Image: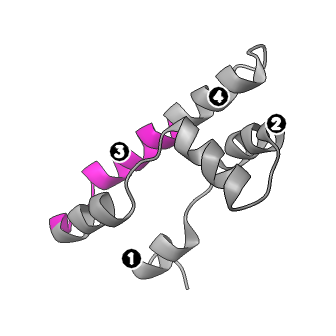
Amino acid sequence: MLDDLLPLKEKAQQACDIRVFIRKRARDIMADEGTRKELDSEKPHKTLQELIQHKIEDKGLTEEEAYLDVIKTACKTNEAVNKQLGLQK
């Protein structure tokens, strides 16, 4: 759970840290080591700064909107990866 008392950037960092923890844990329990290595190579964990830069440059968000989007999407699954792994149609 995110600490709502934190300033926006710190709250986004907390959300990013949770996101990376969940992704690492999910990859740790994957039965297929080859797929895990592929994900690690093709979809590495991004830092908060990398996420913010992507959201500003590629999505055209302001810095504040980018931080808010990190918080909003931190626990959202990646549909493309889910489909690739057969977890979603």
Q: Amino acid at mark 2?
A: Glu
Q: Are marks 2 and 1 in contact (CB under 8 Å)?
A: no
Whether residue 85 appears in this view of the structure is yes
Picture disc at residue 1: 4
Q: Residue furthest left?
A: 33
Q: Are marks 4 and 1 in contact (CB under 8 Å)?
A: no
Q: Percent x, y for residue 22?
A: 45, 44
Whether residue 67 sits left or right of residue 25 in the image: it is: right
Q: Amino acid at mark 1?
A: Leu
Picture disc at residue 85: 1
**Residue under the image location 17 percent in, 64 percent down:** 33
**Mark 3 = which residue?**
25
**Residue under the image location 62 percent in, 53 percent down:** 54
**Mark 2 = which residue?**
64
Per the model, the C-alpha gap separating discs 2 and 3 is 29 Å
Q: Nearer the viewer, mark 2 or mark 3?
A: 2
Per the model, the C-alpha gap separating discs 4 and 2 is 21 Å
For the magenta stretch, what is the residue range?
Answer: 18-33
Per the model, the C-alpha gap separating discs 4 and 1 is 27 Å
Q: Are marks 3 and 1 in contact (CB under 8 Å)?
A: no
> Which of pointers 4 and 2 lies earlier in the amino acid sequence?
4
Graded by Cα atoms within 10 Å as few (under 14), some (14 to 19) or many (20 or more), the crowding at tag 4 reads few
Whether residue 58 sits left or right of residue 8 in the image: it is: left
> Which of pointers 3 and 4 lies earlier in the amino acid sequence?
4
- Which element is circle 4 on? loop
- Which element is circle 2 on? helix
Q: Is residue 14 above or below residue 7?
A: below
**Residue under the image location 66 percent in, 31 percent down:** 12
Membership of 21 in magenta stretch: yes
Q: Quadrant of residue 31?
A: bottom left
Q: Nearer the viewer, mark 4 or mark 2?
A: 2
